[in-house]
Amino acid sequence: MKTLHKKKPFRLYNVLFPIWMLMWFPVLWIVLIPANFLIDFLVTRFTMKHLLLEDYHERAWKHSWKICLIGFLSDFIGAVFIFTIYYFADKLFPKELAHTVTYGLNLQPFNHILTFAITAVSIIISGLCIYFLNRKMLSKDPSLDKKSVHVIARNLALITAPYLFLFPSGILYR
C-alpha cells in the first residue's frame, strides 16, 4: 500500500510580501528604475567631481545605466540569499528557531539576532557585488585610473547597498 505524504504548506505570515521581495513585482520597476538610476548617477557624479575628474558630469552619465543594472543584479543576489534562507529555514534550523527566523525575515529583521545577521550578510553580499562588478566595469574605461575606479566603486557599494532589507515591513501591516 502506497502512503501519501502530505506536503508541508508554504506560508507567508501576511498577505503582502516584505520589502525585500517587492523587487520581484513588475509594477515597481516603473518607480525603482528611475529612482535607482538617479541615485547611482548622483553618487557617481559627486564622487567623480570630488576626484577632480574632467567632464565628470558626462562621464557619470555615460556609466550610470550600467551601474544601475549592476545595482539591480547585486540587490537581486542579496534577495536570493534571504529568500533561500527563508525557504529552507525548517531544514537549516530547529523548528522553533525556524519559525522565529521566517517571521523575522518576513516582517521584522530586528526581532532576533539571527534574522538581523542573515539580513546584514545579505546586504554585505549585495555591497560586495556592487563593488566588484562596478570596479570591473569601470576599469574598462581608459580615462579612469585604478584609484578613481576603486573610489567610485567603493562609494557606490557603501552608499547604494540595499539597506532597505533591514526595514521592518511588519509595521506596514498593523
Image (cartoon, rainbow, N blue to C red):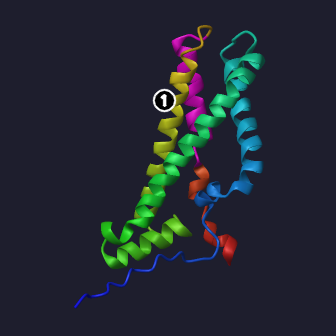
Residue 67 found in image quarter: top right
Image x and y of residue 96, in percent:
36, 79
Q: Identify whether 117 is placed above or below 156.
A: below
Residue 85 found in image quarter: bottom left
Q: Identify whether 119 is placed above or below 2.
A: above
- Answer whether residue 147 is magenta in the image: yes
Q: Which residue is mark 1?
A: 132
- Residue that appears at 51% across and 30% down: 133
Image x and y of residue 75, in percent:
56, 46
Quarter of the image with the C terminus in it: bottom right
- Answer whether residue 76 is magenta in the image: no
- State the extent of the magenta-drawn residues as a range: 144-162
Q: Identify whether 119 is placed above or below 172.
A: above
Q: State whether residue 113 appears in this view.
A: no
Image x and y of residue 13, in percent:
55, 77
Quarter of the image with the N terminus in it: bottom left
- Nearer to the camera, 165 or 64: 64
- Nearer to the camera, 57 or 31: 31
For residue 122, side relative to residue 149 (left or right)? left
Task: Tell me the kind of residue under disc 1.
Answer: Phe
Q: Identify whether 153 is placed above or below 70.
A: above
- Residue that appears at 72% across and 25% down: 46
Q: Mark 1: few, some, or many residues within 10 Å (few <14, many ≥20)?
A: some
